[in-house]
Image (cartoon, rainbow, N blue to C red):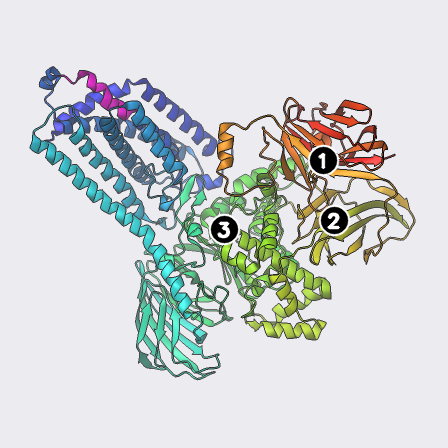
Amino acid sequence: MISLKNILTISRFESKVLWRNWFFRILAVAGIGFLTIFNIAVFSEADVPRWAFLSNSWLMPYASLTLISIPQVAAVIFLATGLIKKDKKVDTNEVFFVRPITNLDYVFGKALALFKLFFLLNLVFVALSLAFNLTSPYTTFQPWAYVIYPLLTSIPTIVFTAGISFLLVTLIKNQPISIVLLLGVAGVELIYYFDEFSNILDFMAFRLPMFISDISGFADLEFALLQRSFYLITGIALLFITAFFIDRLPSHRSARMATGVLGLAILVASSFMMLRLYEMRQNPIELRQDMVALNGQWAEVPNITILSSAIEIELIEDEINASSEMLVKNNTDEVLSRIYFTLNPGLKVEEVVLNDSTQKAHKNFHIVSVDELNIAPNQEVKVLIKYHGDILQSAAHLEVDQKRYEAARDYFMFSMQKKYSFLQADYTLLTKDVLWYPDTQIGYNRKSVTKDRLSFPEFQLKVTTSNGQMAISQGEPVINGNVYQFKPEYPLPQISLAVGDYVKKEITIDSVKYSLYHYRNSDFFVNQLDQLSDTLSYLITDLANEYEDAQNLSYPFKRLQFVETPLQFATYNKIYESLQAYLQPETVYWPEKGSDIRQFDLRMQLRDMNSQAKRQNQVLTEKQKQANVFNDLIKKVFTKQIGADYAFEGLRQDEPDYSIYPNYYAYNSGIVSKEWALLNRSIATYLQNEKQAKADYSRNRNGISFTEECNNLMRESSLNEILSEAKFNKIQKSVSLKSQYLFTYIGQLIGENNFKDFLYTWVNQHQHQLTSYESLRKALITEFQMDIDPIIKKVYFETSQPAFEILSLQKYEVLDGDRKRYQVLAEIRNSGNNDGVIEVKFTSGATADDEDYYRNKVNVTEQNEIPAQLSVIKKGETKLLGFVLDEKPDNITFNTIISRNIPSVITLPVGTLSKREGGELFEGERIITTEKAPNIYEIIVDNEDSAFSSFSPIKPTYLKAYLDSRKTTNQKYYGSWDRPFSKWLPTTGSEFYGTVIRSAHFTRSGNGEKIATWTPDIKEEGFYDLYTYMQGKNQNEFTGNNSSNKQHYYHFIIHHADGEDNITYNISNAEPGWNFLGSYYFNQKGGSVSLTDECELRTVYADAIKWVKQ
């Protein structure tokens, strides 16, 4: 039936034929050339490579094999289909007698030839990575990486692709159609099922999570092995089936049937693997659904509160053997006949003891219930629970929907497996999210999503480790051999545990112990920061003081631990929590070797520091440079006192957040409210003083910012509807905006400084404990004679919004005695349907025109920012806001928080200030009751008005029309990155004209075919001065974009009473705002102004035209 000798013989000769194939040779040379360039660009010392690419010892061969996986599949398809078809020309009786081989020998021989050639080519690709790996002084050589990844990626992919290609071309008997179908299947998998179904369908292994951590190893080896085995065995089965169907040579009926049966048997075996893969994906999803449903059954059942918990845990390979001795109390008003605890579904309960009496316990998924009790109100009971088993990670983060739960986590080009805990022989990481110790708080459920019990028990933890591993938890450790005992000094809402081969570095400053725990091969920072040993304490002191001054809160714990964790450790943002699991009490879990966080790339940061010093003509010592790099890391990653250079708000729902702020509030204090579940998070958001990103590019992508999208949503839906129906990123932003608006509004009613001082004092006086909302409410009534309850109700439930109009903006340079001061007057009207809060702030410093604006800067604080001032402007009210400044501002920003304004944050350049001598300076605000009537007749037609129209004879391309037809939502505004070719589209921005909505139409420049037209309704005939509203030089919001001194023009067509004028207007020196076009006579029949798309610049903008009667 099958002859190994024949297979090898066919393989040998077919390999020679394939090697002579110019398609293969070109492909091989192209692949080698591409990967050589890739390795030089990414991993070599030709430039300073990113530390994220060098830090992991498994990454280099994995990257190369992942990159070539897609083109390799296409090449195998072309060559495999050709191998079968080319022999049809020589399949004659004479050839059969000369070559007495079976169909099975024939198919397997060709498959082996194809496999040998491509696998050897893969080894050449891997050898390239090996060469760069061995020659780089900053990488770690991991020999197993060069064995495991070729076996897992190349072999199954080549075999499966060859098998399905052979079978399809045999059945269809048409090579071109077979190639198109197979490439189509690969394309569908990449486009429609990209990162779907846990990458079960990824036969190329392009996105299958197989990233290996240097700390914890493979995240899910069983799933990866099973998936790759499925495609390997399926490929072999398809080869057998190909031999059955091929009509090349008649075989004995029994041999042919045996071939077919064996092929089907192997295919059935592989189908069981697929079923197992499906179960491995589906079982966690079903478990989460069952747990959520079960939470709903228990959410309203009264329960005890834990006062203290003494946990003992022994780590045994990939399981734990543990017990928890608790003191619990019935804080309800009724006798409890049943109590319950939550515990991970993978843990088995051995025994439950109440007051030294063994009780029968029932465990249903994660709920451990004990019945037939009689616990009176305020009665305290001792409870002991013994349990053992493993941890099911799917029990964590139940409030996360399935789409987010299964969403890929990108790292470099890879999809990384998400893990929420680690329990293995060489590493352990456990947080409260995986329910590794008993608790009495019911998690997320659909019936009572806002119900959350908080508690601050007194914890103790005893851990027995193995193999000399170090245990890390809350509290000062007492170590006796391999036994670690922790007893935190204060009550805590939760504890966590990390156990591994850690190295500890510690420094004590002002009675706080700062500890860094890293793995032995993760001391990359030692050489880069080697000169800071004698100044580290001063740097930390300055950073701590700066942060606490900004937060107005003192650090409430005796230690702050930074613990390195595997790259696969992941967590999520939550609706009712202002933190991620990367932050634990006293502890920050930072990613392995800094992951892809730029500030951990110390070598590149030092390079940027050198360049920055050179540009600024600074002479810095090596110690000063290292100090700047260290400060930049702490301020941007952990204290957020320097904002990111840019952000795409709303794009990533679960961006990692390592801010230490939760240790100042969430893990230190809290307000419990049954009615206002969002209140605690709202307070945390209001008190947190951290810098935001300098620029948000969500508008460039979507036409409006993500904040404005959420404002529109809040205007159409109640908060409860948003919480239950909206996407999480919009829920999160809406809650944040409501929180900011709520407390800013209250602060303005009773005095911002007074209100914040009250809250800061409240938190500092109630450390390590919970307080009730009623207590806070009564204290506010006593202190300020204000009941916040109706205000909270109004803010949370109303959907009407304010709308702010900036009626005038006056700016003066004033000589006040002997010093120069600056007066800014802003007249603002609220024409909306609700009271609103507006925040006004001035900034001075770098702008987008500066040469260094887009360069990466190290330890550079925000541009000089004058403290913001807030004002409540009630519905229908107009206020004059006065500001007196000692420094000349560059920009003025109006943040409307929640409003109908687009943009919601309006940033205007201050520009040239008028000089004024004498006169009284006005600082503060006053209500304007009468508005002056204008003494001139003017008409403004904005692109938002019905008097504006646009025309385009150009039809969109078929591809563009198809892509537009696939959009699921109606889009009103478009980002500037769209640059439409076929028509005018509206976009928004502070630089445009508008009252409530500042927008303009834009299009890609052309030959004058596309026209925008403004048609005024003129009541009084006469001569009018015409003005057009522009962004600035060359119609660019960045006024300095004119380095070539080239002149650019807009082409206007003016229809007036005397006829038509075509004018060419030089926009190269345009000023932001109104620019004069000329004077023309208009009668009551009207006229119009048109703008064509003819321009040498890439984009043409059509905003507003103003007619001012002379």
Residue 513 disc label: none
Q: Secondary structure at mark 2?
A: strand
Residue in front for this viewpoint, 709 or 640: 709
Give the residue type that dot 3 points to: Asp
Q: Position of residue 502 (x, y in %)?
A: 41, 55
Which image quarter is the C terminus in? Answer: top right
Residue 578, can we see it?
no
Residue bearing the label numbered 2: 805
Res 997 visible:
yes
Disc 3 is placed on an element classified as loop
Percent across and percent down for residue 976 are: 61, 36
Mark number for residue 654? Answer: 3
Q: Is residue 373 left or right of residue 168?
A: right
On the rendered image, what quadrant is the N terminus found in? top left
Question: Which amino acid type is shown beneath numbered disc 1?
Answer: Gln
The image quarter in which residue 955 lies: top right
Kindly indicate the quadrant of the structure image that contains residue 538: bottom right
In front here: 640 or 968?
968
Q: Is residue 910 above or below residue 681?
A: above
**Mark 1 or mark 3: whose residue is earlier in sequence:** 3
Identify which amino acid the numbered label 2 is placed on: Glu
Figure quadrant of residue 775: bottom right
Q: How far separated are the C-alphas under marks 1 and 3?
A: 35 Å
Q: Which numbered tag is attached to residue 1031?
A: 1
Residue 254 in magenta stretch: no
Which numbered disc, 3 or 2, marks the residue that appears first in the sequence? 3
Q: Position of residue 173 (x, y in %)?
A: 24, 24
Q: Position of residue 453 (x, y in %)?
A: 49, 69
Circle 2 Cα neighbour tier, 10 Å, few/some/many (<14 / 14–19 / ≥20): some
Task: Find the magenta span and give its range.
Answer: 78-92
Tags 1 and 3 touching, CB below 8 Å: no
